[in-house]
Amino acid sequence: MSTMNVRWRKWSVTFRYIPLIFFGIIFVFPILFMLVSSLKPDMQLLRDTSSLRAFLPIGDISINNYRDAFDRVPMARFVFNSVLVTTITLGLALLINSMAAFSLALLKWRGQGFVLSIVIATFIIPFETVAVPLLLVVNKLPNIDSTGVSTGWLNTYHVQIIPFIADAFNIFLFYQYFKDLPAEIIEAAEIDGASWFQIYRRVVLPLSGPVFATAAILKFLAMWNQYLWPLMVVQSEEYRPVMVGLQYFFQLDVAWGEIMAYLSTITIPVLIFYLMLQRAFIESIASTGVKG
Amino acid sequence: MTALNGSASSSAHHDIARPAGGLKQHYRETIIGWLMASPAIVLIVMFLIVPFVMAFVWSFTNQRLISPNPTEYVGTKNFTDLLTLRTITLHPIKDETTGDLVRDSDGNLTYPKLRDYTRNEEDYPQYFKLKEWKSWTIGDNQIYILAKDPVFMQALQNTITFVVVIAPGQGGLALILALLVNQKLRGINLFRTIFFMPVVVSMVIVALLWRFIYDGQNGLLNSLLHSASFGAFKPVDWLGRKDTAMPALMMMSVWQAVGFHMVIWLSGLQNIPTILYEAASVEGANTWQKFRFVTWPGLRSTAVFILVVITMQAFGLFTQVDVMTRGGPLDSTQSIMYQAVQRGYEKQNIAGGSAISVVFFILVLSVSLTQRFLTREKSR
């Protein structure tokens, strides 16, 4: 009787893994396929798709695709550009959006309600709707560089950075978090005679690790994956980010191995970053939904 | 002094009647408040609100990117060009004298030519320059829906179909996945990590990768189906066929994004107090009853949030189309956003692209207001 029970329980546990493994395969195999294919010559890559060999690093394995892909595009340059644009935007975004949210959530000032409702209203404007008018706006802005003052921001780093610093969703995340901080702590700091900037820096910032992580992760993904905008505003190779580099692979000869190598190169850093911080990633996304 | 200052500012915080000196404090707070918020406000105004207002203004003009002629106000022309729809019913031709229906040599009914209506401004101004969008034969009559801009109409229809399928489909699958990874099993965290993984991969990359998976000749999907069916399955050019392109796009979009919503469901699930499940167990509830009467009511606000988020994301369908199909084949994957960028940027028709953006904005705004209204808290 009891052995049967034990056996049955063992079976039922195994049974519960079946759907998990089924979905696991669906989610992991395309990515696995990309990584494995990047190591194979084109001929073998195409032949292997007909069997499970497509997911195994066997046969003629080499890093030739990576070498060829790096020959085809100035990879180091593109990665550098993407890292630069992403980090600067991220840093400025965290500072400016958290400050605005602090002011909206904890201070009292005239026009506050109006500003907050505008911020929330801008949620539903997807970037694509303003992309073209924005192109015309940045094209009219004055540009100052070593050669003097000119007009138009095209082909620069800042055209990829400045429009993306302020972020309504980011502000909203910070706002919700700051609103829920215990009022007593802030009042105590006020009584101690701390200025608002001091309260922001010394009281609120140290308490806000989780929301900064959330905002940083969302912004990082959005910036690293920028595609349409750099395509529109950066024609010069010097300032191009990684995603735009993909265009180089769809000219006359489509070399799938090289494409897979390039895709892997720009995905692997993000995947490593994700796997290292997966708990933070998942908790961050979860926290965006709690309030609704 | 410090004490006075402190009491003034803390009362300002609670909005109680202010003591003397509170007014000055109030002004200071206003100035600092604006100061701290202003960088973000300025940037949002410059790079979001100004372009948005410009798009709104341009949608009533004939603005082009580069044009020798000055920009002119054209009223609502851009909108009527996009949205004009007419139906027309063509009756089979009758013989004037006998009243019998005229048949051609194959015995089929004959109809007047559509061109006679759409190219005749004098007699049929309402049909002038319209193009066929859809047609049916009902009984002996042919019914046509004519549109001034059938491509945009198709984009509108596709986008709405996409939203109507994706919102419940992706939301539902995300809930199933969340329930799966909410079990207490060894190694469950590994599955959470895997299910969420595609979310961190760029849509551009995912779309390129799936282009290869969907390829008509060497595609992974065809090869796998071929071997799994022992050769019975004939390869399909998934992205090259009118009837499979959109479903293929949907599948891939769900694959990429579903982990995101799974995680939001999961946090909703974990916020349901365990004591409710224990109580249900005591009452003798089975698994389904627990889901129906404990889990689902506890997920209400999460469900609303997920529905709204997926709907808004789905309306913005763009990257997949741009990378995988460019709207084809035969406009079967056109989307509103893709059309907006196509016209505004690639065809340099700023006014036309802007009008699409405005239509899009009004559509999304009204859908999200309707959703808010329908899902509002009923008990007060």
Image (tube, coloured by chain):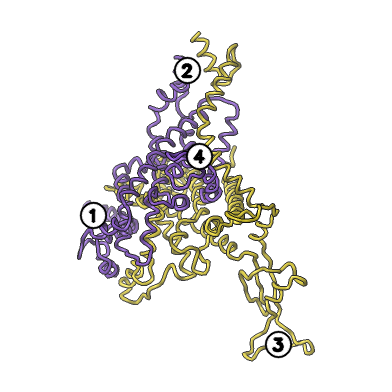
Question: Which chain does purple denote in the image?
Answer: A
| Mark 3 Cα-neighbour bin, 10 Å: few <14, some 14–19, many ≥20 | some
Q: Which chain did the renderer colour yellow?
A: B
Looking at the image, residue B94 lies above or below residue A244: below
Q: Which residue is tagged 2?
A: A190
Look at the numbered disc 3 and give the secondary structure of its residue: loop
The span from disc 1 to disc 4 (Cα, nearest Å) is 55 Å
Q: Are the residues flagged by discs 2 and 3 from a single subunit?
A: no
Asked whether residue B355 is in view, the answer is no
Q: Amino acid at mark 4?
A: Ala
Locate residue B50: give its quadrant.
Answer: top right
Q: Nearer the viewer, mark 4 or mark 2?
A: 4
Mark 4 — residue? A168
Amino acid tagged 2: Glu
Along the viewing direction, whichever of B220 and A62 lies nearer the viewer? A62
Q: Chain of mark 1?
A: A
Please check whether the numbered discs 4 and 3 fall on a single chain: no
Q: Which mark is residue A25?
A: none
| Disc number lying in front (1 or 4) | 4
Label 2 crowd (10 A; few <14 / some 14-19 / many >=20): many
Between the residue at mark 2 and the residue at mark 1, the CA separation in whole angstroms equals 64 Å
Measured from the top left, where is residue A161 in percent x and y? 44, 42
Query: Image quadrant for the C terminus of chain B?
Result: top right
Task: Please indicate whether residue B240 sits to the left or right of residue B368 in the image.
Answer: left
